[in-house]
Image (cartoon, rainbow, N blue to C red):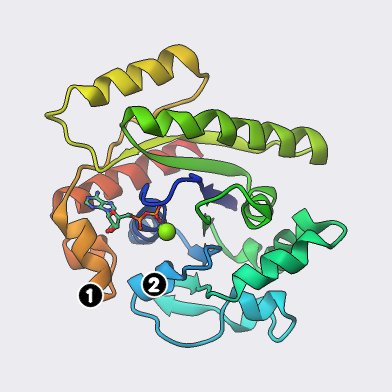
């Protein structure tokens, strides 16, 4: 069992797309997968065609047990989120052991899975810290642009802080280049910069910029189901194979 947070404090870096499509690709490869949305925007559930049902907010509010709110899509288990996470975040800030709350819920069900993937909010707030604390590993989806580099130090510092404060061994599995345009030279400059300045793995797999990846959510499907032979469909399949190899 491995719990992986999909983290980047910037919005629009492919976190939700990666959570869904890595999840769907791992499922296709025979793995038992749960995807949990921890972003109050609730994009994940919508993107796989869920429009009602209880969410992780109900668990934080004490109105439901985590094992009772799991929904099923494309053979994966999904726990959606909703806007109430904004208020839940505020109430968490006042709690002792505020970083451990999600971990205590997930530990009731995580043994059932080969992979638990957590779609993180676009911040390094207490909700993200809850996701990280509950995880063994981190995947950072990133656009290969100079501005993307700015957030990298902050992610690393947050992980180091969690490891030292809470005696965790959270590990960055790697950086996943997303929406890659192979024609652009800039991509290579950014990967070179990361290799020279950080002790971080960049996955061999990259996810190409591909319209099918952005269309799939409006059909409530992963790109693995919607367009398996598209560039992004193939890329997420190779990425899932790489993730299994690394585990
Ligand atoms: N490989 C891709 N090719 C084209 N568009 C993509 C790709 N991956 C993601 N997108 C689009 O980019 C936008 C941001 O992706 P999303 O996964 O929602 O990011 P985040 O969850 O980090 O905010 C979405 O509109 C999504 O459909
Ligand atoms: Mg998202």
Quick check: can you spot residue 133? yes
The quarter holding residue 98 reads bottom right
Residue at 64 percent of width and 51 percent of height: 125
Q: Position of residue 21 (x, y in %)?
A: 34, 57
Kindly indicate the quadrant of the structure image that contains residue 61.
bottom right
Residue at image mark 2? 75
Answer left or right for 140 relative to 54: left
> Residue 209, how many percent across, how many down?
19, 45
Residue 228 seen in the current view: no
Q: Mark 2 falls on what kind of element?
A: loop
**Percent position (x, y) of residue 89?**
68, 64
Horizontal arrangement in the rendering, residue 125 relative to residue 96 (left or right): left
Task: Calculate the distance from the C-alpha at mark 2 to the C-alpha at mark 1.
Answer: 17 Å
**At x 72% / y 59%, what residue is drawn?**
103
The residue closer to the viewer here, 3 or 94, is: 94
Is ligand 1 less than 8 Å from the beta carbon at label 2?
A: no
Horizontal arrangement in the rendering, residue 11 relative to residue 160 (left or right):
left
Graded by Cα atoms within 10 Å as few (under 14), some (14 to 19) or many (20 or more), the crowding at tag 1 reads few
Residue 55: image location, x then y, percent: 56, 79
- Residue where numbered disc 1 is placed: 219
Q: Residue at x 70, y 74 (%)?
A: 60
Q: In the image, ligand 2 is in what quadrant? A: bottom left
Identify which residue, 162 or 243, lies in the foreground.
Answer: 162
Q: Are marks 2 and 1 in contact (CB under 8 Å)?
A: no
Q: Residues within 10 Å of mark 2 (few under 14, many from 20)?
A: some
Which secondary structure lies at badge 1?
helix
Q: Is residue 130 above or below residue 52?
A: above
Direction from residue 121 to residue 186 in the image, left or right: left
């Amino acid at each position: 069992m491995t719990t992986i947070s999909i983290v980047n404090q910037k919005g629009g870096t492919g976190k939700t797309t990666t959570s869904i499509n890595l999840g769907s690709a791992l499922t296709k490869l025979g793995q038992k997968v749960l995807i949990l949305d921890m972003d109050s925007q609730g994009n994940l559930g919508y993107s796989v065609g869920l429009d009602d049902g209880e969410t992780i907010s109900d668990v934080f509010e004490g109105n439901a047990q985590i094992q009772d709110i799991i929904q099923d899509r494309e053979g994966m288990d999904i726990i959606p989120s909703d806007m109430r996470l904004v208020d839940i975040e505020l109430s968490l800030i006042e709690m002792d052991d505020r970083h451990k709350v999600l971990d205590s819920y997930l530990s009731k069900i995580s043994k059932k899975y080969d992979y638990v993937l957590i779609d993180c909010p676009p911040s390094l707030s207490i909700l993200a810290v809850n996701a990280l604390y509950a995880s063994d590993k981190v995947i950072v989806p990133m656009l290969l642009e100079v501005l993307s580099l700015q957030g990298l130090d902050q992610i690393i510092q947050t992980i180091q802080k969690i490891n030292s404060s809470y005696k965790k061994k959270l590990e960055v599995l790697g950086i996943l280049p997303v929406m890659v345009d192979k024609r652009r030279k800039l991509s290579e400059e950014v990967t070179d910069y990361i290799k020279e300045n950080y002790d971080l793995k960049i996955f061999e797999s990259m996810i190409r910029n591909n319209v099918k990846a952005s269309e799939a959510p409006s059909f409530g499907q992963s790109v693995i189901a919607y367009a398996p032979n598209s560039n992004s469909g193939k890329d997420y399949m190779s990425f899932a194979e790489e993730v299994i190899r690394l585990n």
